[in-house]
Amino acid sequence: MKRLMMLVAGMVILGLVFAAGFYFGKKWEGYKVTRVVDGDTLGITDLRTGRDWRMRLWGIDAPEAKECGAKESKAELEKIVGGREPKFLVLGVDGFGRYVVRVWVNESEVVGLMVEKGWARVDPSTESVYDDRKPSLADIGEIRRLEEGAKDAKLGVWGEVCKGK
């Protein structure tokens, strides 16, 4: 009896581990962006269940509501993802209960597009990212390269909009 209980407990734990790996490791599809909160946070809806989620883009920090460039950053993110069904890869959960995600639209990663246009700064902190989901150094290097290009070209927050602010 004791051996049977141990076997059942082991199977339950193994099942939970596999379920968690599937849930957090899959690319989410079948979701639609219903709201852009700001330049790095999305409100999305599961098209199958109607459930709403908040997702924070990994790797960037966009201007907050009262900061220079906030309206423009939000507008740029709306233009990139608005009304589309992007693909999501969940990396973790932040301190506000939002999923930390990587997002692709038409095979382009949204973080790269925001940084390239100058409407977000690189912030590769990974404290909210599960160890097995951390982006590679090559990914971090790529968004840093895009940021340098935006700075050099004086785009977005690096340009005239926020000059001296």
Image: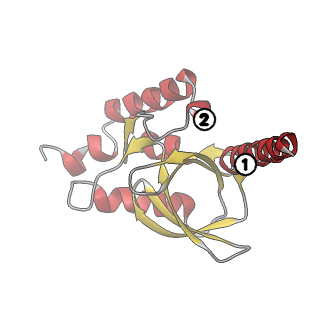
The vertical placement of 78 against 16, above or below, is below
Please provide percent x and percent y for residue 94. 43, 49
Q: Amino acid at mark 2?
A: Arg
Q: Residue at x 82, y 45 (%)?
A: 11
Please provide percent x and percent y for residue 47. 70, 73
Q: Residues within 10 Å of mark 2 (few under 14, many from 20)?
A: some
Measured Cα–Cα span from mark 1 to mark 2: 18 Å
Q: Secondary structure at mark 1?
A: helix
* Quadrant hosting residue 127: top left
Q: Secondary structure at mark 2?
A: helix
Residue 156: which disc? Answer: none
Q: By what rule are the colours in the image chosen?
A: secondary structure
Who is closer to the viewer here, 86 or 130?
130
Residue that carries the numbered disc 1 in the rendered image: 16
Please provide percent x and percent y for residue 117. 42, 44
Residue 133: which disc? Answer: 2
Please provide percent x and percent y for residue 54. 49, 63
Q: Residue at x 38, y 28 (%)?
A: 148
Q: Residues within 10 Å of mark 1 (few under 14, many from 20)?
A: few
Q: Amino acid at mark 1?
A: Leu
